[in-house]
Amino acid sequence: MTERLLCLLIGYLPGTFLTAELIIRKKTGKPAADLGTSGNPGMANVTAHLGIGPGLLVLAGDLGKCLLASALAWHLFHEDLGVLALLYAGLGVTLGHDFPFWNGFKGGKGVATTCMTVFLVRHVYGLICLLAGALLVLLTGYLCVGGAAIPLLFSVPVFLLYGREAGLVMLALALLMVLRNWKQLRLIPSGEAEKNDVLGGLIRRIRNWYRKMRETYNPPEPEPEAEAVPFPEPLTEEDRRIVRRHILFMGRVQGVGFRYQAQNAASQLGLTGWVRNLADGSVEAEVQGGEAAVRQFFALLGNNRWIQIRETRVEDIPLKEGEKKFGVTGYY
């Protein structure tokens, strides 16, 4: 029992080092809890709001601390515990990542540390489960489904190959992953869970890279300026009246590019203001400009394959002087 507790402790202590917390504070001057709608100190949240470079640094840090703790536990206790040394160390790292003592036991979800543990315990079966989880994310669009499925799938070969205790430790990791993702998992049947067009995003990135490469070696001819969005003619005094409106969009409007569609619409129409996600899954915006342009703004934000606006709440608010652009933010 002492060896098992020591493996947990060897994992927990480095697990409490949140790479994302360090990077987010350096980049924004704010804690990870203020980044995006989830405040999650993990790769997905950092990549979504700070870019792929910081996201990869977070991933490297989270995988590295799991690798370090597992190597130490294996070196000290593999003769007595065998593969259990890796499992208990991996569980300890994930507990430390999810519940760091120095941050009021508020941490991440432990996806990266769980995936590294799965791979270290049994490379081939672990890789198969990781690929299966990635495929589920691509098919469903839900990151939470893949995160919960990987340790659950891996529990089966662990039970069969290493026995009851090892299987129970793996199930504990799986249960921890389900609990950390439960907020989103329970919203899937109603369609309100945050959905990510992972495959579409990957395809868009590849297309953008290919287009940039072509433009580098074969610059395109300058394109004429795009025509302004037409307004009803003739414009009345009411149409020209400058207004500012606070808008709350409810439905499937997070993780589907809604804020950037709103920014594009506002840019076309010459509107100012901002748009941001809220913690309850809705999107909040303030829009300022001519009455006719604001009406056009609503018309351009129609539903598509991913976006489904079920309800909007609109109220007039005081004008904001000196505002020059329409911004997108992930903070609330």
Image: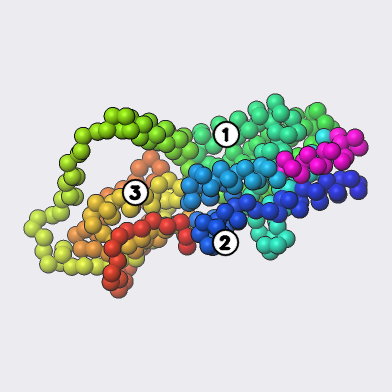
Q: Which is more foreground, mark 2 or mark 3?
A: 2
Q: Amino acid at mark 3?
A: Gln
Q: Residue at x 16, y 63 (%)?
A: 239
The residue sitting at 76% across, 53% down in the picture is: 13
Is 223 positioned to the left or the right of 207 in the image? left
- Which residue is denoted by mark 2 in the rendering? 31
Outermost residue, top direction?
Answer: 124
Mark before the other along the chain sequence, 2 or 1: 2
The residue at which mark 3 appears reads as 261
Q: Nearer the viewer, residue 155 or 37?
A: 37
- According to the picture, the residue beneath numbered tag 1 turns out to be 134
Q: Position of residue 116 (x, y in %)?
A: 68, 38
Colour convention: rainbow
Residue sticking out furthest to the bottom: 318
Q: Amino acid at mark 2?
A: Pro
Q: Which mark is residue 1?
A: none
**Spot occupied by residue 166 in the image (x, y as percentages of width and height):** 81, 37
Q: Where is residue 176 shown, x and y percent of the image?
A: 70, 48
Q: Main secondary structure of the magenta part?
A: helix
In the picture provided, is 13 more to the left or to the right than 260? Answer: right
| Residue 25, percent from left and from top | 56, 59
Q: Is residue 27 left or right of residue 326?
A: right
**Would you say 14 lies left or right of 224 here?**
right
Magenta segment: 66-82
Residue 251 visible (yes or no): yes
Q: CA distance from mark 2 to mark 3?
A: 28 Å
Q: Which residue appears at 28% of the width and 69% of the height?
A: 322
User: Spatial distance from mark 1 to mark 3, Cα to Cα?
Assistant: 27 Å
